[in-house]
Image (spheres, helix red, strand yellow):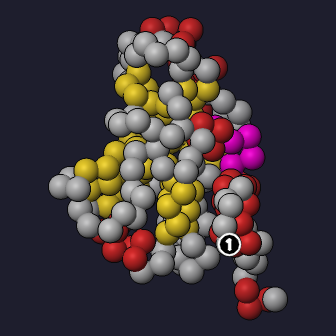
Amino acid sequence: MDDGIAVGRLLVATPHLEDPNFRRTVVLIAEHDENEGTLGVVLNRPLEVPVDRVLPPWAELTTSPSVVFQGGPVAVDTPLALARVPGTEEPLGWRALDGDTEVGRVGLVDLDAPPALIAAEIIQMRVFAGYAGWAPGQLRAEIAEGAWYVVAGEAADVFAGEPERLWQTVLRRQRSELAFVATFPEDPSLN
């Protein structure tokens, strides 16, 4: 069964997913292996922590809003960064997401490297606290249960200027009944 799980695709929480870690989230699939599982980064959970408070050398390179984002419930004390770079070369201090991704030249930044090493190459960058992870087969089962939609991603999704609206934005651009899901009320009982 082709469920669409692939690096660069987006997992969009269905309105029925009530887990507070993932309610109305948009997750970029950053790694996927049938035997190892899946790793993703929640793109639409900005925190109130400025990047310059946790990673001062990287603050000037981050895309607005220049805050740390909650990347997921796993390893929340470990920062990771995604950045977009131009061209086809792989600059030092940056590793492209595996596979032929749909989000363009987006990859992981080595936050232990000096920022000057990659600064000239970065077009956009976001810092995340933690990530989301699924054991082999777990994500496929959650999709089958109706917890996630799997849709195409765009580089603009990773660096959205209004991350709080990303869930609606991604759903609204779908060319199917998913576009209507974007209007699903926050609390249907108030409808």
Position of 112 with respect to 102 (left or right) is left
Q: At 80% from the left edge and 89% from the top edge, which residue is drawn?
A: 190
**One can see residue 129 in this view:** no
Front residue of this view, candidates 123 and 51 = 123
The x, y position of residue 147, in whole percent, is 48, 74
Q: Disc 1 marks which amino acid?
A: Glu
Q: At 49% from the left edge and 69% from the top edge, which residue is drawn?
A: 148
Image quadrant assignment for residue 73: bottom left
Question: Which residue is identified by label 1?
Answer: 177
The x, y position of residue 52, in whole percent, is 60, 28
Front residue of this view, candidates 167 and 150 = 150
Identify the image quadrant of the N terminus: bottom left
Position of 86 with respect to 141 (left or right) is right
Above or below: residue 17 compared with residue 174: below
Stretch of the chain drawn in magenta: 159-163
Q: At 61% from the left edge and 20% from the top edge, which residue is drawn?
A: 123
Q: At 72% from the left edge and 82% from the top edge, which residue is drawn?
A: 187
> What is the magenta segment's predominant secondary structure?
loop
Q: Provide the secondary structure element on which disc 1 rests.
A: loop
